Amino acid sequence: MLNKNSIFKVLLVLVVLTLCGLYALPNLYGEDHAIQISAGRDATVTEAMVPRIESTLKENNINIKRLEFENDQILVRVDDSDTQLKARETLDRELGSDYFVAMNLAPDTPEWLESLGGTPMKLGLDLRGGVHFLMEVDMSEVMEKSLEDAQSDFRTALREEKLRYRRVSMQGNHIDIHFRDEETLDSAEFFLRNRNRDLTYTTPGDNVLRATFSENKLQEIRDYAVKQNITILRNRVNQLGVAEPVIQKQGAERIVVQLPGVQDTARAKEILNATATLEFHMVDLKNDVRDAVEGRVPPGSVLINDQQGNPVLLEKRVMLTGNHIIDAGSGVDEYGLPNVNISLDSEGGNKMSRNTRNNIGKPMATVFIEYKASGERDADGKLIFEKHEEVINQATIRAQLGSKFQITGIDSPKEARDLALLLRAGALIAPIQIVEERTVGPSLGKENIELGMQAIVWGMTLVLVFMLIYYKAFGVVANIALMANVVMIAGIMSMIPGATLTLPGMAGIVLTVGMAVDANVLIFERIREELKDGRSPQQAIHHGYDNAFSTIIDANITTFIAALILFAVGTGPIKGFSITLMIGIATSMFTAIILTRVIVNAVWGGKRVKSLAI
């Protein structure tokens, strides 16, 4: 008999629907208003703080729904937004500026569902509320740092090659290397051209070799600066407790940061604007620090205070910058003393090896540099940043260092952990400034959700009623597939890391509802045609599905390609729309072609049927 289900097809439908239904389930539980407590630079959040926070809130008559400690953070769940605001103000006073106290929304998913990896759909800024920042990277600082690195690299390379030069100086956007004679200049040019192919070399005269970055290298420097800053901003956003932040590049020099659920704009700006970097210098042992304090700083040295305010005289030449660090972890050495284990990329390892080869037994300093906005603007309207430097560590070089080495001489395990965390978090390549700021209130986001849900419900209701009236029993089958389709979209959106539901995304779901039924309409109309041509009900069902298959595939693939292009080239709302559309196309093809066929075969297949209610 025709139209019998295979065991494989039935199992496939059951597994897919069960899996999608399970992961769509967390969306029914909603979210709790919560306060998240995380550590600042000079503090640590431990489980021992939980009783203190609990007692503080109870003393202030604040009802706690649940209190959790996880991932070095404390999460306090409360009943409503008023209690949330009161709790934040209370904990701010109690904990002080050493801790970050942020308001957010935490999923109220049951523990058994969380253990299976179930999480609700991530909502975008327009649905959940939050803050939007458009940030711009200061590329002039990026170029200056890159030129300084190249200048230092030239000095080291020429000394190793025993090519004598008079001086190496930065002049605008290029580096001039002065030689004593033309013969040395020619040898140096040949050597450097083969060693550094990312630079272009000219000889303007007077035994001077001029090096300038090529256009490809300049573009690479800009792209790397933006990508590095995006990575570091993601690490910093973790302190705000944002479940699914949106941090992406926009244009050549700008970064978009969207923090759904965050209403504390001041705290968000404070963390994101903490523009910092790290540098490694040799301590200057040749000159007297007291002379430098009195104003007589040698030309090749720089005077910087340590964390206790004591002056430290360092060599001006930068051995290594923090952007070469790929990992850092705290531990203990063979004597049981705290240390920090550093891992560098290949370029950083080569630089560290060259710079420490002849400095064994000498102290090396780690300098923390922070750029703070002065409040003043330049002629172009951009914020002016002030540079603040601090020596956070001094350690003696025991052996030639490479891509892996240790920082020792640390006072306590806590200081080692803090330093490792700072190094892991990374260093912004250059200062960034906020050029645009928007706040979306939670009430507006809630209204958007309600309106979007109304659109989906009304759209589905009208389609369900139409299919039921027009196609009768087969309309019921189409309606079951349609509801399964929406569940599958919710489940897949919840499973995909980084997928965010936005207001345009909800429009994509409404569109998908219509498209899902469209495939069933094609199949059902084809079955009607087969019946009119005199085929039996079983033959009509069989030929109806088979003949409509190619039409459905062609139509959906072309729409999927269009949605894929929108996702690839679009930003913001366009991406939100395209991702739900692509998921909806895939699920609608599954429900229209496979699920409805399984149901139709289960009801009518393999039986002597005289007529079909279609």
Image: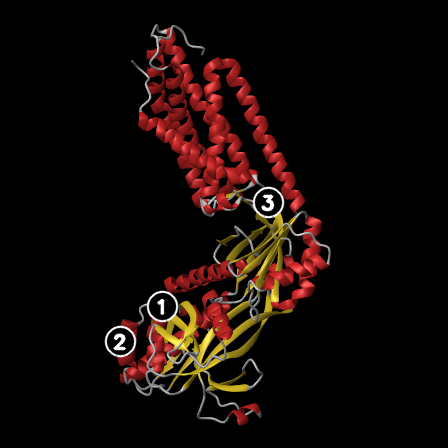
Question: Which residue lies under the disc numbered 3?
Answer: 31
Q: Which SS class for mark 2?
A: helix
Q: Residue at x 35, y 72 (%)?
A: 404
Q: Report if the CB atoms under discs 2 and 3 are less than 8 Å apart.
A: no
Tell me where residue 296 appears, x and y as whole percent. Answer: 54, 92
Q: Please state which of residues 78 and 429 is positioned toward the viewer in this rendering.
A: 78
Answer above or below: position of 346 versus 496.
below
Q: Using the rendered view, name the quadrant where residue 311 is placed.
A: bottom right
Q: Please state which of residues 604 and 575 is positioned toward the viewer in this rendering.
A: 604
Tell me where residue 56 appears, x and y as whole percent. Answer: 68, 61
The circle drawn on residue 190 is 2
- Dot 3, how many residues are within 10 Å of its Cα: few (below 14), some (14-19), or many (20+)? some
Tell me where residue 495 appears, x and y as whole percent. Answer: 45, 42
Tell me where residue 76 appears, x and y as whole percent. Answer: 61, 54
Which kind of residue does numbered mark 1 sit on? Asp
Q: Which SS class for mark 3?
A: strand
Give the mark, 2 or 3, whose residue is nearer the N terminus.
3
User: Nearer the viewer's eye, disc 3 or disc 1?
Assistant: 3
Q: Quadrant of the C terminus?
A: top left
Q: Residue at x 38, y 14 (%)?
A: 604
Answer above or below: position of 92 versus 391.
above
Which kind of residue does numbered mark 3 sit on? Glu
Question: Which residue lies under the disc numbered 1?
Answer: 345
User: Nearer the viewer's eye, disc 2 or disc 3?
Assistant: 3
CA–CA distance between discs 2 and 3? 65 Å
